[in-house]
Amino acid sequence: MSRSFFLAIFLLTLLVGVAAAQGAPFDLAAALAAAQPGDTIVVPAGVYAGPLVVDVPGLTLEGQEGAIIDGGGLGDVLTITAPDVTLRGLTIRHSGKSLDQEHAGITGKAPRLLIENNSLENVLFGIYLKEAPDSVLRNNRVTGMDLPISRRGDGIRIWQSPRALVEGNYVYDTRDVVMWFASDGVLRGNVIENGRYGLHFMFSDRQTMEENVLRSNSVGAYLMYSRGLTMTNNLLLDNYGPSGYGVALKDVDDVHAAGNRIVNNRVGIYVDNSPREGDAFVIFEDNLTAYNEIGIEMLPSVTRNVYTNNIFQENREQVAIAGGGELRGNDWARGGWGNYWSDYAGFDADGDQVGDLPYRSTSLYENLMEKYPELRLFQLSPATDALDLAARAFPLFQPRAKMADEHPLMTPPESPAVPGLPEPPLLANLAAALGMLALAGVVMFLGVRKAGVTRNP
């Protein structure tokens, strides 16, 4: 046969091979079945049917742009049952809708999982770790189903999985991000919004929460039945659901909250039976609590709380007692250094930046609101000032102080810098005011100059 004939056969074979390679879809289920421990499977763009199971130890499943696993609304979309698995760069969507079965986008059931840079869409539960210790959830985006909040699953649930790192995730339209019987976790740099509880802790000791944004939830962070919780430099903003707490404590011990910004919530800080144990503590220091309906609300039985160097700025009611009464056994200053209260009317004769008179919460109108909450309708109206003025004029009607800060600060302390978060409203308002003054000065200068030019042509 001629040389040209063999060349034609070779070219035809090559073209058939290329066509077959282009037309043959990647079989993800077959690739998972054939994988060996430690393998890496690169998933090309395309839509792959779930549910799928990863049961090979040390496997890396890495999606290229446009790689989608679609559960078709049936059960868990992807389940990991082997340790040391990495799941990266995939879009996971359309889980089942059964709350009883806890259908999820990703369910992890083995230790040391790394789940990062994935997008989960239209899933009931987002990422659910069950007995998966030492796992990392990083830079994932979780969007829940369009359901009433009572029907949603948790965006992230960590159950009996100690030492979890939950970092840099965005969670939207789900129920909670919850740590449940999971100790020694770190939650850092997450944005959680439009849910029920932004962060929720149940029986989970020694947790660290730092630089999270918890926005537009029913509750920003609810800390319950746990010990050794640290909250640092978080933003808790616009939490106005049925509870509307920025941060709520219930039956927790050894809580240290510092550098947080608790802004524009129904209640900034809510405390119920915390601490529980006689040797435990709750400390709030260096926080900004501003523009909330209520700055702090506490049950009258709460004791052994310490508040120092905080800013309480323009809360409509700075301190409220749930059910009325008087707060006893709490410290509103430490080492002769109390808190800044924007409604403090005292003076500082010796110039030490500490008021010479205690700050006392003695508003008659606030006391009436505790008994008749419907009176909040008239808050900030002339009626409130009239009642409090009358109470001061006639001491017979003036109520007992709910609390007293013996060492109130004359100026607000500097709020700690929080990387990536908005500046404190107090500073923002000051900057805006200075900006308006500068603008007014420019207008006046131009007006005077124009007038001068007109008078002296």
Image (spheres, helix red, strand yellow):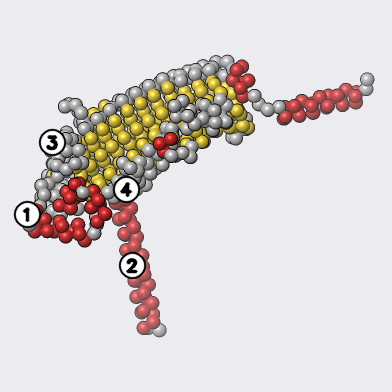
Indicate which label's residue lies in the foreground, 2 or 1: 1
Question: In the image, what residue type sits under mark 3?
Answer: Gly
Query: Which residue is denoted by mark 2 in the rendering?
Result: 441
Image coordinates for residue 258, horizontal then vertical, percent: 27, 38
Contact (CB < 8 A) between labels 3 and 1? no
Nearer-the-camera pick, 154 or 26: 154
Question: In the image, what residue type sits under mark 1?
Answer: Pro
Q: Secondary structure at mark 2?
A: helix
Q: Residue 92's image quarter? A: top right
Image coordinates for residue 60, horizontal then vertical, percent: 54, 23
Image coordinates for residue 329, horizontal then vertical, percent: 13, 36
The quadrant of the image that shows the N terminus is: top right
Contact (CB < 8 A) between labels 2 and 1? no
Question: In the image, what residue type sits under mark 2?
Answer: Gly
- In three-dimensional space, the C-alpha distance between marks 3 and 4, rounded to whole angstroms, equals 28 Å
- In three-dimensional space, the C-alpha distance between marks 2 and 1, rounded to whole angstroms, equals 46 Å
Query: Which residue is denoted by mark 1 in the rendering?
Result: 395
Indicate which label's residue lies in the foreground, 1 or 4: 1
Residue 341 appears anywhere in the view = no
Q: Earlier in the sequence, mark 3 or mark 1?
A: 3
- In three-dimensional space, the C-alpha distance between marks 1 and 4, rounded to whole angstroms, equals 33 Å
Query: Which residue is denoted by mark 4 in the rendering?
Result: 264
Q: Earlier in the sequence, mark 3 or mark 4?
A: 4
- In three-dimensional space, the C-alpha distance between marks 3 and 2, rounded to whole angstroms, equals 51 Å
Query: Which residue is denoted by mark 3 in the rendering?
Result: 329
Residue 217 appears anywhere in the view = yes
